[in-house]
Amino acid sequence: MSKIIRSYDERERVSNEEERVSDEEERVNEREDETVCPECGGNLVSDEEHGETVCAECGLVVEEDSVDRGPEWRAFDASERDQKSRVGAPTTKMMHDEGLSSNIGWQNKDAYGNSLSSRQREKMQRLRKWDERFRTRNAKERNLKQALGEIERMASALGLPKNVRETASVIYRRALDEDLLPGRSIEGVATASLYAAARQVGVPRSLDEVATVSRIDAMEFKRTYRYIVRELGLEIRPADPQSYLKRFESELELSPATQRRAHDLLKTAQEAGVTSGKSPVGLAAAAIYGAGLVENERVTQDEVAEVTDVSTVTIRNRYQELLAAADETDVLPTNVTVDGSDEAAA
């Protein structure tokens, strides 16, 4: 009986072995088929640029629209590959640890959405406190965390984009590394960094706008800004009045014709050299008011002053200068005089 059982087991083992060998041969044949052209038997090559598998002999496209599941970056050696390789969210200069650490959430709920008991809440509160302490290991990191939080708050209030916030964070880090903070407040250097970043990126805000959301007085802000720019050697180009126009025009809901006229008035004045040495915000406000007069769109000086934070006196003085420059170059309509009045109406 035992011999019969052994004989049966032996036949079963041999049968399984034959099936395994047969399956392996099929897989080898399939792999060979995948690398051989079904038409001419030539070798297949992958064209990663076009997402195609093509026969090198006859040019037959065997497969197309293949998905590249590799990284979006390119590396030309092992060290560059190691440097560019990453996991998780991208790093950011807007966080003191560049976003490399994790934190304990403030929702007192478990993984199933159930509320924690009072004892568990107390435990989580202690863990959060220690987590915050360990994330800032020294005075420099605590300084950086406070400053970057202040930059984020002001940038959000001013509606500044992410690239401005990143640039401001880099400027503040440079100031901290070069030991420029002694004798100056964290808020002051953070405000100056944000203002400089907005100017560099090309989405400037006026000194008064930034001072409004800052926690320091305007004099300290201006003094710190000049110091930071000088010591760090920042390249800050003079603010272009044109860069303020779009935002102000949007808030005032001006017609396309008035918007075009405002841009033309500023361009003409810049070419004539009238804008040199004058506040870019004041010039933008004057261009908007002057354009409204020329295009017969009712925009009062008070409305423009409220949106641009420029006095009505400045608007009156500047818009007449802009209209005078436009009149000299024959840009103004014939029925509009330099003082903004309509001759036909008169």
Image: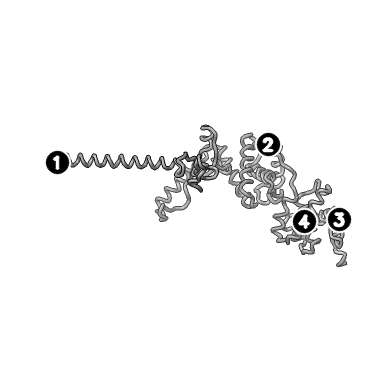
Instruction: Name the residue that disc number 3 marks.
Output: 330
Of badges 1 and 3, nearer the viewer stands 1
At 69% from the left and 47% from the top, the residue drawn is 202
At 30% from the left and 41% from the top, the residue drawn is 20
- Do callouts 2 and 3 mark residues in contact (Cβ within 8 Å)? no
Judge by depth and name the residue closer to the eye, 219 or 288: 288
- Do callouts 1 and 3 mark residues in contact (Cβ within 8 Å)? no
- Secondary structure beneath label 3: loop
Of badges 2 and 3, nearer the viewer stands 3
Instruction: Name the residue that disc number 1 marks.
Output: 4
**Residue type, label 2:** Leu
Q: In which quarter of the image is the C terminus?
A: bottom right
Q: Which of marks 2 and 4 is nearer the N terminus?
A: 2
| Horizontal relation, residue 254 to residue 56: left or right | right
**Residue 48 appears in view:** yes
Q: How far is mark 2 from mark 3, CA to CA?
A: 45 Å
Instruction: Name the residue that disc number 4 marks.
Output: 262
Q: How far is mark 2 from mark 4, CA to CA?
A: 36 Å
